[in-house]
Amino acid sequence: MSGFGPDLKREGQIIRRNLFENATLKVDEVTFTPGASPGVHSHDVAGVRYVLEGEILFQEADGRRWTRKAGEVYWEGTGITHYTKSVGPGRLVLLEVLLQARP
């Protein structure tokens, strides 16, 4: 059973800028406008997220919730359904270092 309500949808603007990419890694800068969210989603590649600016809310399907602020790092694995949202007063900027999917 999913712990997500129907109100957890995509909102605001999210801009992704590729900074580096090779066969092993992809590095992106991701900027969320205040209150922006990609909605409930999962990833097919794992990676580290470093919060450069702002604050992010992360909610898992079992209801666990946590936040990370500028200067903090977190890991996102593959296939984990979750919800994220920019919850600080300003924009949210993440540096994502993603492992490229292997064939």
Image (tube, helix red, strand yellow):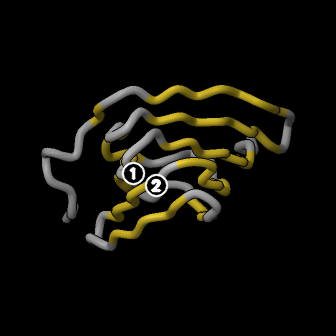
92 over 66 or under it: above or below:
above
Res 84 seen here: no
In the drawing, does residue 54 fall left or right of residue 1? right
At label 1, counting other C-alpha atoms closer than 10 Å, the crowd grade (few under 14, some 14-19, many 20 or more) is some
- Which part of the image, by quadrant, shows the C terminus? top right
User: Which residue is rendered at x = 81% and y = 32% of the image?
Assistant: 21
Secondary structure at numbered mark 1? loop
Report the front residue among 7 and 56. 56
In the picture, measured across the screen, residue 96 lies left or right of residue 12, that is: right
**Whole-percent x, y for residue 52 in the image:** 63, 49
Residue 53 point in image, percent of width and height: 57, 48
Q: Residue at x 14, y 45 (%)?
A: 7
Residue type for callout 1: Gly
Question: First in sequence: mark 1 or mark 2?
Answer: 2
Q: CA distance from mark 1 to mark 2?
A: 5 Å
Q: Is residue 70 left or right of residue 98?
A: left
Q: Nearer the viewer, residue 6 or 54?
A: 54
> Label 2 sits on what residue type?
Glu
Residue at (59, 45) in percent of width and height:
94
The residue that mark 1 highlights is 88
- x 66%, y 54%: residue: 47
Q: Which residue is mark 2?
A: 55
- Mark on residue 73? none
Q: Position of residue 93 (x, y in %)?
A: 56, 42
Report x, y in % for residue 70.
58, 57
Residue 28 sits in quarter: top right
The answer to whether mark 1 and mark 2 are in CB contact below 8 A is yes
How packed mark 2 is, by other alpha carbons closer than 10 Å (few <14, some 14-19, many 20 or more), is many
Q: Please, which residue is most extreme toward the left here? A: 6
Q: Secondary structure at mark 2?
A: strand
